[in-house]
Image: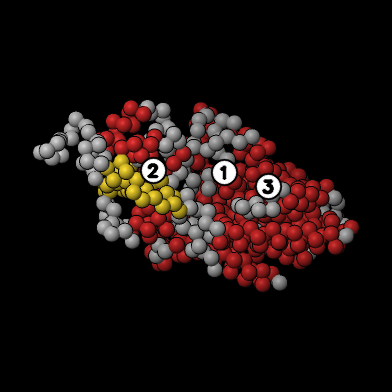
Amino acid sequence: MILFLIGVAFLLRTTTLTNQSLWRDEVDAIRFSSWSVRDLVGGLFLTGHNGPLYFLLLNPWRDLMGDSEFALRFPSAVFGTLVVALGYVLMRQLGFGRRSGVVLGLLFATSPYLIWYGQEAKMYAMLLAVITLAMIAYLRALAGRGITWWIVFVVSTSLSFYLHILAPLMLGVYGIVAFLRPEKIRHHWRTWLISMACLTLPYLPLVLWQLPVLIEGGNLGHPFYPLRQELFILLQLYSGGLFRSLKITPIVLFVFLFLCGLLVKSQTKSVRASSFPPRLLLAVWTLFPPLAIYVISLRVPVFEDRYLIYITPAFYGMIVLGLMAVRQYSRSIAALCLGIILMTNLIGVWQQQHQPVKADFRAAAAYLTAEAPRPATIMIQMPYLQHTFKYYYPKKYRLIEGLWTNDGKSEMVVDTEMRQLTRNLSELWFVVSEEESWDQRRLVRKWLDSNADLIDEVRFTRVDVYRYQFRPGAIETESIETQSPGQ
C-alpha cells in the first residue's frame, strides 16, 4: 500500500509541475546556483542568507538537465515524494502499526500544502525530507540501534543547517526529547554529548551574523505576527491548502483531531507499553519551532510559513493519532473524519493545479513577444522582478527601473525623476507586479496617466502590462530641446 501511495504522490507532484509560472524566489534559485562556491559559502556570513546547500546541488543538476521549469522543479517533486516513505518509517519507529504509517503517508501524499512546495524550485521539500530523516535516525540512535544512526543523525542535521537558517531550531526539539527520555540518555549520554558537540561546528558560521542581528534587533523584510496569528496561519495552510475553499470546516476538524491525539490515551499495545508517549514527542516537534520563531520575532521578525515546513510530519502525525483515538470509540466517525480530510485535500490540490497563484510572467512575456514591433523600452515595477521577467523574455530592450516611493518621496520629486527617466521617449511599456512593495501610493502610475496616453492594458495573474505613448511636447525638462522647428 505504501508503494502505491508513493506512486500517487509522485504523479500528483509531477504531472502538473509546469502549470504555474516561476516566481521570483525560484528564479533566484537559478541566479544563486550560478554563483561560485566561494561566493555561496561567503554568503553564510551575510545577513539574510538562507543557506547555500540547495544552490550548490542545483548547479550540477542544471548543467545536466537545463533550466526548464520542469527540470528546475523536479528535484523538489522527488524529495516531496520521498517524504511519504519517510513518514511511514517515522510512524513505525514511534511504535505504531502499518495502518498508522499508511494513513500518515496518505496525508503526506495528498496534502495541498506539501504538494505546493513539492512543485517549487526551492529548498523546502529537501529540507522537509532531511529533517524527517534526522528525527528517524535520532530516535533509532536513542533506541540503541548502533553508532551508524548517530552518524546519520549528525550528518543529516548538519545538512539541514545549510539548507535553511531556521533549521537549527530543531536542536531545541532534540534536546527536549532527550530530557523527556532520561532512561535512554543514561545509556548513551557520551554519544549524545559527542553528537551535539559535532553539531556545534557547522552552526558557527550562521551564528556569526545571526547573533548580532538578534541582539541589535531590526527588520529583515518580514512582518511581525503575534503567536496566535502565526499558529492560525499554519493551521489554515496545513488543513486546507492555499485556497481554503471550505473555510473553517477543515480547521475545526484538524483542531479536534489534534486535541484527540494529544489528550486521548491510545489503547495500542506498543504505544501503551512505551515509557515515552509518542504524542508528547510530536507535540514538542509541532509547537516548539513556532514558539521559538515568535520569541525571535520579538527582536527580528522572521516568520514565514514555509520556513517551518519541517514541523508538518509531527503535525500530521498528531492528526493520525487523533484518528486512532476516535477509531477506538467509533470506526464510522474516524472514517468520516478521514474522508473529509481527503476530500478537502483533493479540492485544494485541484484548485492549486488549475487556478494560477504565482505572478504569471510567462503569459506577460508571451504577450510582449507577440507584439510587433517588440517593445524597445520597458519599465518594471518593482525592479527586482527584472530577473523573473528576463527568464521568460530574454529579448533585447532598454530597462528602466521603477521608482522607489515607499520612502516618502513626494509627488514633486517623482515628477522630476520621471521626466528625466522618460526623456526623449515616445513610447513606454510598464510592467507591474508587487507594486505595493515598491510604490504603495502608485505615484509612478499616476504620473504616467497624467503625462502619457494609455493605449493598451492587459492583466495577468499578479502581473499587469501597460503601453503608454507620450504626447509630443508633453514632457519638458531643462535638458529637452524643442522637438521641431515649428514648436
Relative to the observer, which residue lies in front, 147 or 79? Answer: 79
Quadrant of res 68: bottom left
Q: Residue at x 27, y 35 (%)?
A: 419
Where does residue 256 sit, x and y in percent of width and height?
79, 49
Q: Which label number is shown at residue 178?
A: none
Position of 195 relative to 81 (above/below): above
Residue for point 58% across, 40% down = 303
- At label 3, which amino acid type do we have? Leu
Counting other residues with Cα less than 10 Å from the Cα at mark 1, is it few (<14), some (14-19), or many (20 or more)? some
**Which of labels 2 and 1 is toward the front?**
2
Secondary element under disc 2, as helix, strand or loop, is: strand
Q: Position of residue 99 (x, y in %)?
A: 77, 65
The reply to whether residue 433 is visible in this rendering is yes
Amino acid under disc 2: Gln
The residue pinned by badge 3 equals 235
Q: Depth check: give the residue in front, 421 or 257.
A: 421
Q: Nearer the viewer, mark 2 or mark 3?
A: 2
Cα distance, mark 2 to mark 1? Answer: 24 Å
Q: As drawn, is 304 to the left or to the right of 59?
A: right
Q: Callout 3: helix, strand or loop?
A: helix
State the residue position of label 2. Answer: 381
Of residues 427 and 413, which is closer to you in this image?
Answer: 427
Q: Which of marks 2 and 1 is nearer the N terminus?
A: 1
The residue labelled by disc 1 is 304
How many labels were placed on the picture? 3
User: Can residue 171 be seen in the rendering of this structure?
Assistant: no
Residue at 36% x, 29% y: name it.
Answer: 411
